[in-house]
Amino acid sequence: MRSICLYFQVHQPFRLRTYRFFNIGDDHHYYDDYQNRQIIKRVAEKCYLPANKMMLDLIKEFGTAFKISFSISGTAIEQLQQYAPEVIKGFRQLADTGCVEFLAETYSHSLASLGNREEFVKQVKRHSDTIEFIFGQRPKIFRNSELIYSDGIGEMVEEMGFTCLLTEGAKHILGWKSPNYMYCSARTPKLKLLLRNFRLSDDIAFRFSTHSWPEWPLTTEKFTGWLNGIESREEVVNVFIDYETLGERQWKETGIFDFFAALPKAVLSNSNFQFSTPADLADVLQPVAQLHVPHPISWADEERDLTSWLGNELQDEAFSKLYSLSEKIRNIVDPSIERDWQYLQTADHFYYMCTKWFSDGTVHKYFNPYPSPYEAFINYMNVISDFTLRVDEFLQKPQVVKVIGVNKENARKKVVKKTQVKNSENALKSLTFNEIITLADNKIKQVLKGIDIEIVTVALKGARKDIREKIEKNLGKRSLKTYNEMQPLLKSISTTEVKKSRSLIEKQIKLLTK
Amino acid sequence: MKVLMFGWEFPPHITGGLGTACFGLVKGLGKQSVDVIFVVPRAFGDEAKEGFRLVNASDMVLDFSNSIYQEHWNRIKFMEIGSNLIPYVGPEDFEKMIQEDTMKLSTETQSVFSARYQFSGKYGHKLMEEVSRYAIVASVIAQQNNYDVIHAHDWLTYAAGIAAKKISGKPLVVHVHATEFDRSGENVNQTVYELERQGMEEADLVITVSHLTRQIVIERYGIHPDKVITVHNAVEPPDHPDTSEVKRHLKEKVVTFLGRVTFQKGPDYFIEAANKVLKKDPNVRFVMAGSGDLLNKMIKRAAQLHIGTKFHFTGFLSGTEVDTMFALSDVYVMPSVSEPFGISPLEAMRSNVPVVISKQSGVSEVLKHALKVDFWDIDALADAIYGLLHYEGLKKMFIKYGKEEVDNLKWDNAAAKVLEVYQQALNLKQ
């Protein structure tokens, strides 16, 4: 039996708001919440919800004979949780069928694989943790943002323990070779490579509703016919597309849902193809050849290279400005800085600065919230300028209470020690976290003043309702805003983390009640 | 192909962009093997004339016993009214005009009906009289020459164009470089408006310098869209003196506004944006070069905002001073409220100066490598200026692509399009 592998990319960036230079140093909120919400709601309604339902129905109908795979970026997950939680529920239902595989990628759909190795590894881990936490399965197969791949990236991915990676079946890499086999990396042959069949993928993703295309309309009979026409020795056809193709890029009226709804039956009954996920394929298929990819490839545009995101003066300056902060960020424990650091790395920001479309098509205009790459660049640079200020300020500040975060054990220990030294001088009566409820409101306000809101927020995760209410009502307006904004992030915070934050608050109380 | 063309001014005796545009177009047409007879109210003798014939309307002697003129005069007589009209005033004319007005130098002995008439060819208070006389002369010229098409530039010459058409029966193309709405906002001079509308009505085809202007012609003058064709302006290859020697004495970066300081150029938005930028970064200097009726108000505003030490007024600049100003600039800003085309950003780009232009300018339709903002959006304007001053990548991109883009806006291409319009007009007639 040969295989067809359906893989869908699900991604949404945190789009930036219009951020003027005079906001620099003053306003640290960078995102267009209104627009993001609108888009997520729209895409959920037109694509994610109906598509998830359809996939679930198909799996119910065909059982294990129908399998698909997804990669969902962390930025998409966060926004879906916030604006369309029923979509996450739908994905979870799909995960529970056992017929759906989730792939690993960078948390924020970033270009970190090209910018900073350490950051890349960290983001992939963070993404895998998130997927495991939400969908109950740890990704085994890797796919990079926009299928970007090179020998060097392969090496990093292999070192992280992945055995297989998805990338583009780029013509200039393959030459006469067919994408319909398993390959492996030339530098690290243990890493298997699944290559996108760009002809069949793009027939669905781009040409499906193009009336001037000679093959229009694309029916499942025709598609199955093409599969049958593939030379019998070839083992796998990889159809990798954006999930948004269903209903958002190709509207419902084009018949895209009907096409997918009819596809399993057509393939299973009229061809010798079966549906497989990348992990299935990685288990059974052996590489037929090694691939050398010295320069990064991607699945974008005719060139299948990086020029959508990097290469012009604007993109290069923004990119180097961003990753010049890597070193500094490593020493920072601050949830809001760390969060923005993730969101600002999303590849889309660089895509908006691409100048290629000045000369050719306008296909990309649709995905671009800016009138020109220049505006995109200015806006991004303003944001980065503010972000850089915050990073520098943070590093200059004495870090007495700036101490939460996920993997910053060392930083934490140091700070806690500092506080302990101070405290040991005054033997004070101690209050446990839950005894806060006994304090007067003005005392609580005093305590809160000395502690970062991030710590308070983490400390209150899973706290008793009366305690939460007692503290919430004593928070200032700004703090309350951050507190609310941080709620969706709390899922990834462990209980030890919470305990530590609580003990910090207890210490603060001690200091004040002596 | 032979064309009888009516203009109002011709280099080097120009007060605005009209003369320069006509010159570029005529040269471009010459390369397309089009013979042009170019008529101006007053020739000074030092005009460039390679490749076409320049006719001086002031030299024409008319015999008013000929009934044909009388008849024509009856038709266009209404133009006599409003002799104190000061329409599209050039910057250096501005001060002179005020003086003339206060001194009331109205001791003219000439009459529109004298056999010989000395046109000023300017835009003074006798403008309407000159326009009328020009139309009468046009009918004579129209009779004495052979040509296929008549082409009239801006309202001053429309009456001449119409007269020529009546005499010869040849198709008339009028070329709209600006409309009364661009010059006067909503307070249009009805006489001028009526002249413009009539010119567009009588014309077989109307050329506009931008889609923006085309829209105005269709919407405000009620001209049928099929009749109105956009041919964007172009820019002459540089004949600038070498400014690489220009020394910069200031360590601060310089942001420049260059143009008439009048309502439609949006100088007030420039000042407000400057104020915003200076609040964030005091190491910038702003220059407002030019004069106009809003100049005093602008000086007052700069004082009010306490940015006087960083905001400079140069007054009117001419010739090489303009080139020097560009050489000293890091950013050029054109925040026009209404600009049919707007050639100055192209000149700035040619000098490797990045530009910020308003979306309400015709030139924004042809430029990709420029930052475009709504003229009223001071925040966006300030942000664009700040971005150009602080983010190197942007400047690099502009210098890399901007000059190339401008060099490709050739009058040859514009002339080829105009030629197509002539063909179309001839086909319509047949």
Image (cartoon, rainbow, N blue to C red):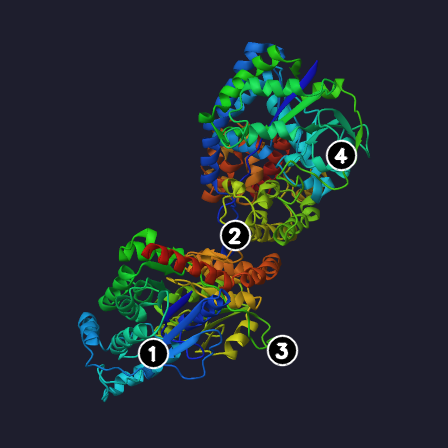
Element at label 3: loop
Q: Which dot marks residue A154?
A: 4
What is the chain identity of the residue bearing mark 3? B
Q: From mark 3 to mark 2, how far is it between C-alphas?
A: 33 Å
Q: Which residue is mark 3?
A: B245
Q: Are marks 1 and 2 in contact (CB under 8 Å)?
A: no
Q: Determine crowd level at label 3: few under 14, some 14-19, many 20+ residues with C-alpha closer than 10 A.
A: few
Residue type, mark 4 in image: Gly
Chain letter for mark 4:
A
Tell us which disc is closer to us: 1 or 2: 1
Q: Please, which chain is the residue tagged with disc 1 on?
A: B
- The residue tagged 1 is B41
Q: Are marks 3 and 4 in contact (CB under 8 Å)?
A: no
The alpha-carbon separation of the residues under discs 4 and 1 comes to 76 Å
Residue topped by disc 2: A375
Point out residue B367 in the picture as x, y percentages from the top left corner.
Answer: 50, 57
Look at the numbered disc 2 and give the secondary structure of its residue: helix
Comparing B122 with B6, the one in front is B6
The 10 Å Cα crowd at callout 1, few under 14, some 14 to 19, many 20 or more, is many
